[in-house]
Image (spheres, rainbow, N blue to C red):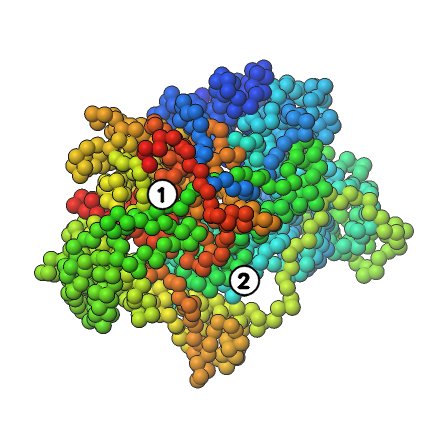
């Protein structure tokens, strides 16, 4: 399985270079395929299975042999165009009906074949056999009947032509006579997996060859239209991300606007300027470079920097197959590039390759002088000047975006060769982007103190105004049981903090006042920890005022307070307490402290009771070989109390392995809190790639089901995968203008997929640019609920994340799970104390 | 996954299981007759590192560098490999890549397209690369009087009768200022332990000994107004010095500064078919050093500023110009501190202290909408920019009517 997936994974770059991506070799023995000319979406199950077997062979076969699958980790790139059926069975409908209908456009072009003309797939044989792939491909060009209208991977030939003649005589440059024999293996009908594959290859060729776009990973950029921002050493390449897929409406070309950020400084220049700035601090250099993506001058390839090797220089020798050679000589001889700086440290890139089935780690040394930096560093990201200057180009509102989308189509139409290519395959792109209808859900009611409610104005970005009244549902009895730890220098700030707390706390309805201050000698992490440990006041929560956000100090404090001495903690950078900001900052901090101690801030009106909402997310630990899974479950009907647990799995593995334990513990906790088990469990799973859906369904869902089946009465189960990074955008038609759809907008037609139960939700209102909807993919729906319910629940849960008085992009349980995994992965590197499991200490 | 043991050694080189299986099961492939396209240039006795073809290209490039040739044609360009070397020479303005195999060129022509880094690291001199399809025996006026024509490992692919015509076309009609020709040295073949009459490549019509090549060169120079220098690529192992280099070559230099009369070049004739032509990005020369220096100053000040903001929370950083001058990227401009102060003053973001010795850079925007707490990433979730005025549909004055009839209403 894995080998097949990989082999096709490799074919993706080949397609960019203009050579057809090899279809699964031997996956379609001749003579068998003709029956398969029916789109896989057709109802007849045998057809569906056959179609699935073709390109998605590994996916279809996997359930039978789950052990053969490397659990998660390896993304199944091969199944990119395969459409695995993941939709829960026996569903009447996956569409909702509630809400106010709205007319919108979406970033898709419809793709049709003129007169529904199919493509033809031929199996090709050479006599004598040609082992050389290049040669086989070259020979195909000698068949005049094909008129260059073909895609050939060395074995299978796709063409829109139905050939009368199937035997051809050609001649190699070596003057050998070769017979080429074609056997028609199948008609590729519009919408079938092969059709999608061929259409994608064609579109890639058009983008690369005829539109002059450069491929970087899967996206295409136009270097001729680059925008230079010289003071930041940045160049911005406008471009597109596109893919052709089959959706419930028809075959669609999805198109999104992208900008590639390329830096004009080499890694060496970048290192030199850090060197000057930090006066030669190697850790600083490593910190800024590790994780960065560099692009090499000589072969246009990109590499992730995994380490900086300060002990190796370009003048050092490296062992190659052919002998020892210095890096300098290597570049000189192989690329005619002269390395000037002989003493620069080298960058290390590690990659894993499979050699005869064994995972082997390969290490590549790169010379910084010949590497360009790409993307933004964290430092750059926190620089408002850079972000401001970039946003000017990258943030495009619906109007601008729409124009850019049409521009893509226009440039295809303008390029004669591109149009000709499309025409010669009978492909047609719709002139306008696709219209789609959506439904706006009513605004939600925010629940506050004593069951009071007030409607949340969906058009505003937040409902910040609740903080002006005495609103919290319940207050943790903090009173004066809290300690502020700060350096002597910051005692002034600490006093400001206490004064402001006394003002804003009661105003929100939080019982907090007084508190004591402990001063420490220096701002070293140990001093903070000693102060916390030896503090005799026995506070409920400790507030650490820190001079800056140094990660190691933060990590040390959190480690201490989450593991060694379980105690909710709040870290606050002193500079935020300046008079201008103090009020609003302290209000938020007090609310956060309240939440960390189990106080309830606000909720949203959900009529349905006895439901446990579960959020799951993963975080890939920077420092170790493991990744963290965060598991958070709601414990009451108001969704204000949560139980949490973390799990560990081998690095880069998205799948969570101990879900059964997590779920069992959560159910026990739910029972001990409420005296009963939940009637329904609704799981929102974040952080899953498209290729892992099947694995999630097989493993995680199974584990959860096992846990549920142990209960006296198994609760109803809904399992939803949440995806934030998606291509789909929606533009609301408002007269002649296009704007962002309002929060609460649901789309569950046309751009959804037949084989899934999925929908899109616009959760937020954005000030600039175009809003990104969130994708919800329901993998399990064993419930009496209707699609409408799950759509509304998803939106409701976006309102109740305690760190933001507004809606967030994902259901709050997902965001809590993310926060938890992030804290554990970034700072703790170990399981937090179980004593904290019922508190939102990770906020 | 069960580890696969590839028992059939004939297909052991298969890239993956699929290829292995399909080759093994294909009755047509079973005899494994392969078309060897690669030229023999190494054996158990001799191995070249880097491979000889790279050494050969490097050597020809070396000659182009020495001669600072600005217009170059590569005959028999095939996969355009040599063009990849030529295009990195910053003084070259025009490259013609010529071959007679149209299919081959069509499949390879995009290789000479500017890459990402060509756009980033723009050339100081313009460069056009044109891929032409045609035979050296025809005449195309675009290639007349070039600085250099290269024919690398080409001549041995011609029929012996055509060699004479080739010389006439090259030296008699095209009359470039320089010609570089390379060809195998037959003397060296003893080290490959060939069969009698075997040559290094199936398509070679002949291979010349050093003596034969010298005779050819002398023939050219007596007939046309050129002189030549011989060179070799790929030294033999020390115990076989007598066989000479693996590959031999000659640089021909035109003697006359004025061209001999030829009727052809008077009429512009573009016989060769242009399959592809591309101009490389060129740097904007209108930008002054001060412009670049100003950007460098802003960049470095921002970098220092943002680092101090990260470390110590400084909202304003003071950077001494003397410190800036220690940066190699600024130092290289060799300007006075006062000049830097002047440039900084002219920018939008930087301010200069009154004493003119330091630059002030502001690390936070004037109207702060910064996160309220250092470690919170919540603001990534939610945009903090102002609300931009969304209005409901005009025809919906009575307020939106939501239509919910989802059944199972008791749940809500």
Q: Residue A275: x percent and y percent?
A: 40, 65
Residue located at (47% from left, 35% from top): A748
Could you tell me which residue is drawn at 56 percent across and 46 percent down? A733
Residue found farthest to the left: A536
- Mark 1 and mark 2 residues within 8 Å of each other at the beta carbon: no
- Of the residues under marks 1 and 2, which one precedes in the sequence? 2
The correct choice, above or below, for B76 with respect to B315 in the image is above
The local crowd at label 2, few if under 14, some if 14 to 19, many if 20 or more residues have their Cα within 10 Å, is: some
B95 relative to A468, above or below:
above
The residue that disc 1 covers is A796
Q: Which of the 4 quarters of the picture holds residue A498?
A: bottom left
Whole-percent x and y of residue A32? 56, 15
Q: Residues under labels 1 and 2: Cα distance?
A: 42 Å
Q: Chain of mark 1?
A: A
Which percent across, then down, holds residue A592?
Answer: 26, 55
From this viewpoint, which residue is outermost toward the front?
Answer: B398
Residue B240 in the image: x percent, y percent?
Answer: 57, 42
Give the structural element (helix, strand or loop) at label 1.
helix
Residue that badge 2 annotates: A229
Of residues B318 and A576, the one drawn nearer to the viewer in this rendering:
A576
Q: Residue furthest right?
A: B263
| Closer-to-camera residue (A833/A66) | A833
The reply to whether residue A669 is in sight is: yes
Neighbor class of circle 1 (other Cα within 10 Å; few <14, some 14-19, many 20+) is: many
Q: On the rendered structure, is B288 left or right of B74? A: left
Residue A290 visible here? no
A702 displayed left or right of A127: left
Q: Chain of mark 2?
A: A
């Amino acid at each position: 399985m894995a080998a097949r997936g990989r082999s096709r994974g490799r074919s993706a770059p080949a397609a960019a270079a203009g050579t057809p991506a090899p279809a699964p070799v031997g996956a379609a023995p001749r003579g068998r395929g003709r029956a398969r000319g029916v789109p896989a979406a057709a109802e007849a199950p045998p057809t569906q299975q056959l179609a699935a077997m073709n390109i998605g062979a590994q996916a279809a076969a996997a359930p039978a042999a789950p052990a053969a699958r490397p659990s998660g980790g390896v993304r199944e790139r091969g199944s990119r165009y395969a459409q695995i059926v993941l939709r829960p069975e026996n569903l009447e409908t996956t569409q909702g009906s509630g809400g106010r209908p709205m007319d919108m456009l979406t970033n898709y072009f419809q793709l049709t074949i003129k007169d529904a003309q199919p493509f033809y797939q031929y199996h090709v044989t050479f006599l004598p056999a040609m082992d050389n792939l290049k040669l086989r491909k070259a020979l195909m060009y000698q068949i005049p009947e094909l008129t260059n209208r073909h895609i050939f991977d060395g074995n299978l030939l796709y063409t829109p032509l139905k050939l009368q003649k199937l035997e051809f005589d050609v001649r190699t440059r070596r003057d050998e006579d070769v017979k080429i024999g074609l056997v028609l293996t199948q008609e590729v009908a519009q919408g079938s997996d092969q059709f999608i594959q061929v259409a994608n290859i064609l579109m890639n060729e058009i983008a690369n060859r005829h539109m002059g776009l450069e491929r970087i990973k899967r996206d295409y950029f136009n270097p001729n239209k680059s925008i230079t921002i010289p003071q930041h050493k940045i160049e911005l390449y406008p471009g597109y991300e596109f893919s052709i897929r089959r959706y419930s409406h028809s075959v669609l070309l999805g198109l999104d606007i992208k900008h590639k950020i390329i830096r004009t400084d080499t890694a060496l220049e970048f290192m030199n300027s850090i060197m000057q700035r930090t006066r030669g601090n190697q850790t600083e250099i490593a910190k800024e470079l590790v994780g960065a993506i560099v692009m090499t001058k000589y072969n246009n390839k990109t590499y992730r920097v995994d380490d900086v090797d300060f002990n190796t220089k370009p003048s050092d020798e490296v062992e190659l197959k052919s002998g020892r050679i210095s890096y300098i000589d290597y570049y000189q001889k192989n690329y005619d590039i002269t390395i000037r700086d002989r003493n620069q440290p080298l960058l290390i890139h590690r990659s894993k390759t499979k050699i005869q089935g064994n995972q082997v780690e390969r290490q590549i040394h790169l010379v910084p002088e010949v590497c360009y930096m790409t993307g933004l560093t964290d430092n750059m990201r926190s620089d408002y000047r850079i972000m401001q200057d970039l946003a000017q180009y990258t943030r495009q509102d619906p109007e601008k975006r729409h124009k850019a989308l049409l521009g893509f189509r226009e440039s295809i139409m303008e390029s004669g060769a591109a149009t000709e290519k499309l025409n010669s395959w009978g492909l047609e792109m719709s002139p306008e982007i696709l219209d789609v209808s959506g439904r706006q859900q009513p605004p939600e009611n925010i629940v506050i103190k004593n069951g009071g409610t007030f409607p949340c104005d969906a058009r505003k970005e937040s409902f910040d105004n609740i903080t002006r009244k005495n609103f919290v549902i319940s207050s943790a009895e903090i009173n004066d049981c809290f300690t502020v730890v700060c350096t002597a220098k910051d005692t002034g700030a600490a006093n400001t903090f206490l004064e402001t707390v006394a003002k804003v706390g009661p105003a929100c309805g939080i019982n907090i006042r007084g508190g004591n201050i402990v001063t420490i000698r220096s701002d070293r992490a140990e001093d903070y920890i000693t102060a916390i440990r030896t503090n005799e006041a026995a506070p409920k929560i400790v507030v650490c005022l820190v001079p800056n956000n140094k990660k190691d100090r933060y990590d040390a404090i959190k480690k201490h307070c989450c593991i060694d001495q379980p105690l909710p903690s709040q870290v606050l950078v002193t500079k935020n307490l300046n008079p201008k900001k103090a009020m609003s900052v302290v209000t938020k901090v007090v609310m956060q402290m309240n939440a960390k101690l189990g106080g309830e801030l606000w909720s949203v009106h959900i009529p349905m009771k006895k439901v446990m909402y579960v959020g799951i997310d993963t975080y890939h630990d920077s420092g170790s070989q493991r990744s963290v899974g965060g598991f958070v479950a709601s414990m009451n009907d108001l969704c204000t109390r949560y139980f949490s647990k973390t799990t560990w799995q081998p690095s880069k593995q998205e799948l969570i392995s101990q879900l059964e334990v997590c779920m069992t513990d959560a159910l026990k906790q739910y029972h001990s809190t409420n005296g009963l088990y939940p009637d329904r469990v609704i799981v929102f799973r974040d952080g899953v790639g498209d290729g892992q859906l099947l694995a999630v369904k097989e493993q995680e869902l199974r584990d959860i089901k096992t846990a549920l089946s142990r209960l006296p009465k198994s609760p109803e189960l809904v399992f939803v995968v949440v995806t934030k990074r998606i291509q789909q955008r929606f533009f609301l038609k408002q007269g002649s203008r296009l704007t962002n759809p309002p929060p609460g907008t649901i789309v569950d037609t046309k751009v959804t997929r037949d084989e899934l139960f999925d929908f899109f939700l616009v959760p937020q209102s954005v000030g600039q640019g175009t809003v990104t909807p969130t994708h919800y993919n329901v993998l399990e729906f064993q419930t009496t609920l209707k699609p409408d319910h799950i759509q509304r629940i998803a939106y409701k849960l976006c309102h109740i994340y305690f760190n933001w008085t507004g809606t967030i992009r994902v259901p709050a349980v997902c965001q809590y799970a993310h926060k938890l995994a992030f804290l554990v992965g970034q700072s703790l590197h170990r399981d937090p104390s179980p004593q904290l499991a019922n508190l939102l200490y990770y906020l | 996954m069960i580890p696969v043991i590839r028992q059939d050694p004939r297909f052991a080189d298969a890239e993956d299981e699929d290829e292995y299986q399909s080759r093994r099961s294909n009755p047509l492939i079973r005899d494994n007759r392969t078309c060897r396209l690669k030229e023999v240039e190494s054996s158990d006795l001799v191995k070249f590192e880097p491979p000889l073809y790279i050494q050969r290209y490097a050597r020809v490039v070396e000659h182009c560098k020495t001669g600072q040739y600005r217009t170059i044609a590569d005959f028999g360009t095939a996969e355009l490999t040599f063009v990849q070397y030529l295009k990195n020479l910053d003084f070259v303005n025009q490259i013609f890549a010529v071959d007679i195999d149209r299919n081959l060129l069509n499949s390879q022509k995009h290789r000479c397209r500017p890459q990402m880094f060509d756009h980033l690291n723009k050339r100081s001199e313009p460069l056009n690369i044109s891929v032409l399809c045609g035979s050296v025996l025809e005449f195309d006026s675009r290639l007349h009087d070039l600085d250099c024509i290269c024919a690398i490992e080409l001549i041995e692919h011609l029929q012996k009768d055509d060699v004479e015509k080739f010389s006439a076309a090259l030296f008699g009609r095209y009359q470039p200022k320089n010609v570089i020709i390379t060809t195998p040295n037959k003397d060296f073949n003893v080290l490959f332990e060939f069969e009698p009459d075997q040559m290094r490549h199936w398509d070679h019509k002949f291979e010349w000994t050093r003596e034969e090549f010298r005779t050819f060169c002398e023939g050219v120079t007596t007939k046309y107004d050129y002189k030549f220098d011989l060179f070799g690529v790929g030294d033999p192992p020390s115990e076989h010095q007598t066989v000479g280099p693996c590959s031999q070559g000659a640089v021909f230099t035109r003697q006359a500064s004025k061209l001999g009369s030829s009727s052809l070049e008077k009429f512009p004739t573009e016989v060769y078919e242009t399959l592809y032509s591309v101009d490389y990005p060129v740097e904007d020369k209108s930008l002054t050093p001060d412009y670049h220096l100003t950007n460098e100053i802003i960049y470095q000040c921002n970098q220092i500023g943002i680092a101090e903001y990260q470390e110590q929370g400084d909202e304003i950083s003071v950077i001494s110009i003397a410190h800036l001058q220690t940066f190699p990227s600024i130092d290289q401009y060799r300007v006075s501190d006062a000049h830097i102060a002047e440039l900084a003053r002219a920018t939008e973001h930087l301010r200069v202290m009154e004493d003119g010795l330091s630059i002030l850079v502001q690390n936070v925007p004037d109207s702060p909408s910064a996160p309220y707490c250092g470690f919170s990433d919540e603001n990534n979730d939610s945009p903090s920019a102002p609300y931009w005025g969304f209005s409901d549909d005009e025809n919906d004055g009575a307020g939106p009517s939501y239509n919910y009839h989802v059944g199972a209403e008791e749940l809500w």
